[in-house]
Image (tube, helix red, strand yellow):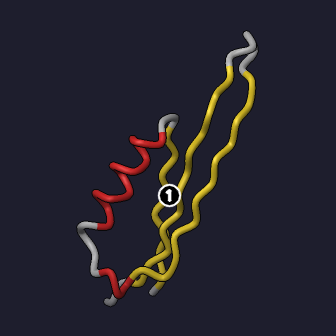
Amino acid sequence: MLKVEIYDEEHEKDLQYRVNNFLSGINENDIIDIKYAINAFLSNNGEQIYCYSAMIIYRIYK
């Protein structure tokens, strides 16, 4: 069975920590793919906001 784990953080180091923490708990041979994206936009008051996200696609066995 395939599953996904999705993380979304405002800081790249926070995303790195969460992804590494998840990956430490699964077998690396079960990782299918990791998708990474960065988005930037302006808030209502003109502040630049960054969004770092990752989706991990992995296999589990029942």
In the displayed orientation, state which residue is furthest to the front: 13
Residue at the image point whose x is 33% and y is 49% from the top: 17
Q: Which residue is mark 1?
A: 6
| 61 w.r.t. 8: above or below | below
Q: Quadrant of residue 49?
A: top right
Is 25 left or right of 59, judged from the image as shown?
left
Is 37 left or right of 10, judged from the image as shown?
right
Label 1 Cα neighbours within 10 Å, binned few <14 / some 14-19 / many ≥20: few
Is 52 left or right of 24, judged from the image as shown?
right
Residue at the image point whose x is 31% and y is 89% from the top: 62
Expressed as whole percent of the image width and height from the top left, the position of residue 46 reads 75, 14
Residue at the image point whose x is 48% and y is 82% from the top: 32
In the displayed orientation, state which residue is furthest to the top: 45
Looking at the rendered image, the quarter that the N terminus falls into is bottom left
Question: How many numbered badges does the structure rendering display?
Answer: 1
Is 14 left or right of 21, judged from the image as shown?
right
| Local secondary structure at mark 1 | strand
In front of the other: 6 or 50: 50
Expressed as whole percent of the image width and height from the top left, the position of residue 18 reads 35, 51
Expressed as whole percent of the image width and height from the top left, the position of residue 29 reads 35, 87
| 46 w.r.t. 52: above or below | above
Badge 1 amino acid: Ile
Residue at the image point whose x is 44% and y is 78% from the top: 58
